[in-house]
Image (cartoon, grey):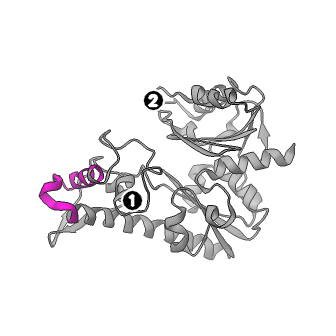
């Protein structure tokens, strides 16, 4: 059996050989079924699945997105099981499957850390969830999580720079940002060393390569400049302004949730775990426990499925 987490931008699969992350945007003509079929051909016998990609705006609504994802999986694994927001596995498309990936992670981790909490920060979002009172989490939609502070919509790759920072000091002058989608969090985190080539798996804003110079050029455009106009120092100032704002936003949300829940342990997953674990005083799940932090929901749903066999 394999574990699958179908996001809007990334498809994450956990099997016996480890973690596999595929850039697979569902708002375009998605090769979702074809990628999953490769694992069937490689010998996988079934799949346990979670999702959040049903929200992609290529679908009319979440129901259409859920049906698309379930159908894509079932083409290869007709007996696949899907974890839902009711904390149960399902075999057919239903509303409960919407955005249940974070709940699978919590259901698994709380077995070992009943009074802990989770920060799972990936390409797009940060899930910040205390494990205490698990029953109150059942059925909590993403809208309700946004309201509760359990979902912060920023990630290591896909957040537009101008959504969190509005200015940087360049050549001694406060320089406002344009609000065009010139650069993203992946560019800022890459040039500051928080992620590398392997982690930067999303499409870039201009469709060009991932390299230090390319990222710096995209960042420079945020202030309507070529890199030659503001230099590397100016582009790095933009990156630092963004990352400082992002880290404060996430860390403040973690501190608030921790204080409210009196959690005794913060478990950090996602590609942002090496960056954020020390910032929040948490445990990097991969480094400390061997859990595949980059694909935590896929790993968690696989373990939950094995437990019920």
Q: Going by the image, does 254 lie left or right of 114?
A: left
Q: CA distance from mark 2 to mark 1?
A: 26 Å
Neighbour class for label 2 at 10 Å: few (<14), some, many (≥20)? few
Predominant SS along the magenta part: helix
| Any part of residue 120 in sight | yes
Residue at horizontal 34%, vertical 59%?
191
Q: Position of residue 192 (x, y in %)?
A: 36, 63
Q: Are marks 2 and 1 in contact (CB under 8 Å)?
A: no
Pick the quarter of the image with the N terminus.
top right
Quick check: is 181 in the magenta stretch? no
Residue at horizontal 62%, vertical 49%?
141
Q: Position of residue 104 (x, y in %)?
A: 71, 51
Q: Going by the image, does 186 lie left or right of 303?
A: left
Residue at horizontal 75%, vertical 64%?
133
Q: Secondary structure at mark 1?
A: helix
Residue at horizontal 30%, vertical 40%?
208
Q: Position of residue 275 (x, y in %)?
A: 49, 66
| Any part of residue 86 in sight | no
The residue that mark 1 highlights is 189
Upstream in the sequence, badge 2 or badge 1? Answer: 2
Given this view, does label 2 or label 1 mark the residue nearer the observer? 1
Neighbour class for label 1 at 10 Å: few (<14), some, many (≥20)? many
The residue that mark 2 highlights is 28
Q: Please determine whether, in this image, residue 119 is positioned above or below residue 207.
A: below
Q: Residue furthest top?
A: 75
Magenta range is 214-233
Q: Secondary structure at mark 2?
A: loop
Quick check: is 223 in the magenta stretch? yes
The disc placed on residue 31 is none
How many numbered dots are placed on residues in this image?
2
């Amino acid at each position: 059996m394999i574990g699958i987490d179908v996001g809007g931008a990334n498809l994450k699969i956990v099997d016996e050989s480890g973690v596999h992350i595929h850039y697979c945007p569902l708002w375009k003509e998605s090769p979702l079924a074809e990628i999953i079929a490769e694992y069937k051909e490689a010998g996988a016998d079934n799949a346990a699945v979670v999702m959040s990609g049903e929200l992609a705006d290529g679908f009319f609504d979440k129901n259409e997105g859920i049906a698309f994802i379930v159908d894509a999986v079932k083409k290869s694994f007709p007996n696949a099981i899907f974890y839902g927001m009711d904390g149960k596995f399902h075999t057919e498309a239903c509303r409960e499957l919407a955005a249940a990936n974070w709940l699978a992670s919590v259901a698994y981790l709380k077995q070992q850390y009943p009074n802990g909490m989770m920060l799972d920060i990936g390409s797009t979002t940060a899930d910040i969830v205390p494990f205490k009172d698990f029953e109150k989490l059942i059925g909590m939609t993403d809208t309700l999580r946004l309201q509760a502070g359990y979902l912060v919509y920023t990630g290591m790759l896909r957040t537009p720079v101008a959504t969190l920072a509005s200015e940087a000091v360049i050549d001694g002058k406060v320089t406002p940002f344009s609000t065009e989608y010139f650069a993203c969090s992946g560019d800022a985190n890459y040039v500051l060393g928080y992620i590398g080539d392997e982690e930067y798996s999303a499409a870039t804003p201009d469709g060009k390569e991932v390299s230090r110079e390319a990222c710096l050029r995209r960042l420079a455009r945020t202030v309507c400049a070529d890199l030659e106009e503001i230099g590397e120092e100016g582009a790095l100032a933009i990156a630092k302004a963004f990352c400082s704002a992002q880290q404060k936003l996430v860390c403040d949300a973690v501190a608030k949730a921790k204080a409210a829940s009196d959690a005794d342990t913060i478990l950090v997953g996602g590609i942002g775990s090496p960056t954020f674990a020390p910032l929040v005083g948490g445990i990097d799940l991969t480094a400390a426990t061997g859990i595949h932090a980059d694909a935590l929901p896929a790993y968690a749903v696989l373990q939950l499925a094995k437990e019920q066999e």
